Amino acid sequence: MRFSPRSNFARTLVVLAGLLIASQIFSYLTILNYALLPSIKQFNKILAHEIEVMLDDDLLLSNGKVYHMDELLRRQLLEKLGVTMHDDDEPEMMEEFDHAASVDYLSADMSEKLGAPTEARISLESKNYVLWLESEAFPGYVMRIPLSELHQDDFQPLFFYSMFIALLVIGGGWMFIKVQNRPLAALERAAQDVGHGKFPEPLPERGASDIRAVTKAFNQMSEGIRKLEEDRALLMAGVSHDLRTPLTRIRLATEMMSPEDSYLAESMIKDTEECNEIINQFMDYLRSVQLQDMTEIDLNVVAEDVSVADGATGHDLEVSKGELVGKLDANEVAIRRAVTNLVVNAVRYGGGWVKISTGTSADRRHQWIAVEDNGPGIAADQIETVLQPFTRGDTARGSEGTGLGLAIVKRIVEQHNGVLKLSQRSQGGLQAQIVLPLTKRQPRKRR
C-alpha cells in the first residue's frame, strides 16, 4: 500500500495540516463540552424558572406572602422581559415558528425543567437569533424569546480568527519544511548529475544532523566515482596503446614474410585485424558520452550518412525518412556509432535486405530511428539477454563477434536518456528502434 502523496515535503505538509485540523476539532469539542454546554444549561435553567413563575397564578414572595397575578399582568411582565406569546390568530408569527430550526438538545432540557413536553426552535431574524418554545405547559401558545445579546456577527470573528491561525500555521509549516528540504533538493539534483556523467562540486553540509551526514556520504561517493572514472579512462588509454603497439609490430613483421608463407601471413593479418576490432569494441563500450559534446542533430542526416557509408561497402540499404518534429540534442558521433552497429548486425544476420527509417512519436516528445532486417530474428525470451555484454543470440543468428554490439548501442542510448526497443517483424526478421527524448524548450524570460 502506497502513501499518497509520495514526496517527503508533501507528506510532511499533509501530516502537519491533518494534525492542525485535528487540534482545531479537539479545541471545538473542548469548548463545546466544557464551556458552551454548561452555559446553555444555566441559561435554560434561568429561562425555565422565569417561565414557571409567569405561568403560576399565585407568586410566593420572599417574605412569605402570596401575590396573585392575572393573565394580563403576566403577559405585561413577559413583554417587559422581551418575551411574547402568540397563537393561531397571528399567522405571520406562526409561519416564522414553522420555519425555525428545531434544536433537540434544548428541547430535551426544557422539557425536563418545565416538566412538560417542550419543543425548542431557533431562527435568525435580521442579525439576531430568536428562541421559540412550544410546550404543553402553555397549550395553544408559542413563546417567542429574542436573544438580543446573541448576534450572527459574534461567530464570524471566531471563524475568521480560527481560519487565520490555521493558515498561519500551515504557511509557517510550509516555509519551515521547505527550508529543511532545501539540502535534500540540492542532493537530488547532484545525484541526477552524477547519474548523467557529470561530477558537481562537493555540496555544502548544512541542515539537520542526519541530512548533513547523508550529504557528507554523498560527497565521498561522488568523489570516489569521479576517481574511478578517471582511472577507467587512464586504463582504457593505456590498454589500447599497449595492445595496439605489439599488434602493429606483428602485422609489419607478417607483411615482410616471404611469398612462400603467404597463407600464414594472411591468417595472421586477419587475426590481428580481429584483435584490433575487439579492442575498438571494448573502447566503444567503455567510452562515456560527455554532455559538452551534445549538439543539435538531424536523424535523417544520420540515416543518410550511415546508408551511404555502408553502400560504399557493397550493401544496399533502403532508407525511409520521416517527419522530425522538435529539437534533438545528442552526441552525433555516438548516435552514428550506435546506428552503424545496428546496421552491421542487420547485414551480418539478416537475409540481405536492410531498412533504416526515422520519425517522431505520436506525442511529439521523442524522435526515433529504426533498423530492420529480414533474417531469422531473435526469440522473444532472448531479447533481454542479447542486450547484455558478451552475450550473443542463438545459433539462428550466428555466433560471430564479441557480443558487445547491442550492448554498446544500449549503453549509448541510455546515456542519452533514451530507450532501445527490439521486436520481431510481422514479415519476419528483427526491428531495432532507438527512441530519444526531445530537448525541452526553455521558458522565455520576461522583460
Image (cartoon, rainbow, N blue to C red):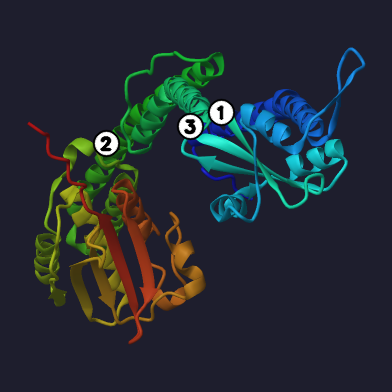
Q: Quadrant of residue 196?
A: top left
Q: Which is in the foreground here, disc 3 or disc 2?
A: 3
**What residue does disc 2 label?**
241
Discs 1, 2 touching: Cβ within 8 Å: no
Dot 1 or dot 2: first in sequence order is 1
Q: Which is in the foreground here, disc 1 or disc 2?
A: 1
**What residue does disc 3 label?**
9
Name the foreground residue: 417 vs 18.
18
Q: Where is residue 12 in the image (x, y as percent from the top left)?
A: 54, 31
Is residue 330 placed above or below 206 in the rendered structure? below
Discs 3, 2 touching: Cβ within 8 Å: no
Identity of the amino acid at label 1?
Answer: Ser
Q: Where is residue 172 in the image (x, y as percent from the top left)?
A: 45, 21
Image side of residue 265 versus residue 377, left or right: left
Q: Position of residue 340 (x, y in %)?
A: 22, 61
Q: Which is in the foreground here, disc 1 or disc 3?
A: 1
Dot 1 or dot 3: first in sequence order is 3
Count of marks placed on residues: 3
Element at label 2: helix
Element at label 3: helix
Rate crowding at label 1 as few (under 14), some (14 to 19) or many (20 or more) other CA atoms within 10 Å. Answer: few
Q: Where is residue 181 in the image (x, y as percent from the top left)?
A: 45, 25
The disc placed on residue 331 is none
Whole-Å distance between the Cαs marked 1 and 2?
100 Å
Identity of the amino acid at label 3?
Answer: Phe
The disc placed on residue 148 is 1
Element at label 1: strand
Q: Quadrant of residue 22?
A: top right
